[in-house]
Image: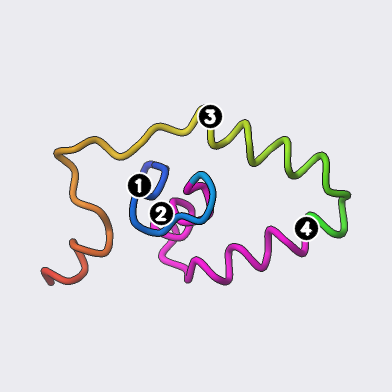
Amino acid sequence: MKKLYLSKTDRKLLGVCGGLAEMTGMDSTLIRLIIVFLCIITGILPLLATYIVAGIITPERPAGLPDEASAKAGQ
């Protein structure tokens, strides 16, 4: 089972969208577009609060674990 970690390489603010993209295998730009679309539809404050909380409680990737990009490059 894949775990969600904040992305160290693909981050714009906190690394939440980049971490979701690494976990799901989707493009991070697509994840960000979905987040912006949901933010417009639901109102900015609920999704912004969710993003900040996710950035606070989601752990950084441990130093010993390879990131998804380097794991795919090694295949």
The stretch of residues the image draws in magenta is: 15-38
The local crowd at label 1, few if under 14, some if 14 to 19, many if 20 or more residues have their Cα within 10 Å, is: few
Callout 4 amino acid = Leu
- Numbered disc in front, either 1 or 2: 2
Residue tagged by mark 2?
A: 23
The local crowd at label 2, few if under 14, some if 14 to 19, many if 20 or more residues have their Cα within 10 Å, is: some
x, y percent for residue 69: 26, 64
- Numbered disc in front, either 3 or 1: 3
- Numbered disc in front, either 4 or 2: 4
Residue tagged by mark 3?
A: 56
Whether residue 8 appears in magenta in the rendering, the answer is no
Q: Alpha carbon of mark 1 to alpha carbon of mark 2: how far?
A: 6 Å
Residue tagged by mark 4?
A: 38
The local crowd at label 3, few if under 14, some if 14 to 19, many if 20 or more residues have their Cα within 10 Å, is: few
- Numbered disc in front, either 3 or 2: 3
Helix, strand or loop: magenta stretch? helix
Left or right? Give the position of 35 relative to 26.
Answer: right
The local crowd at label 4, few if under 14, some if 14 to 19, many if 20 or more residues have their Cα within 10 Å, is: some
Q: Alpha carbon of mark 3 to alpha carbon of mark 1: how far?
A: 19 Å
Q: Residue at x 17, y 71 (%)?
A: 73
Q: Alpha carbon of mark 4 to alpha carbon of mark 2: how far?
A: 20 Å
Q: Quadrant of residue 41?
A: bottom right
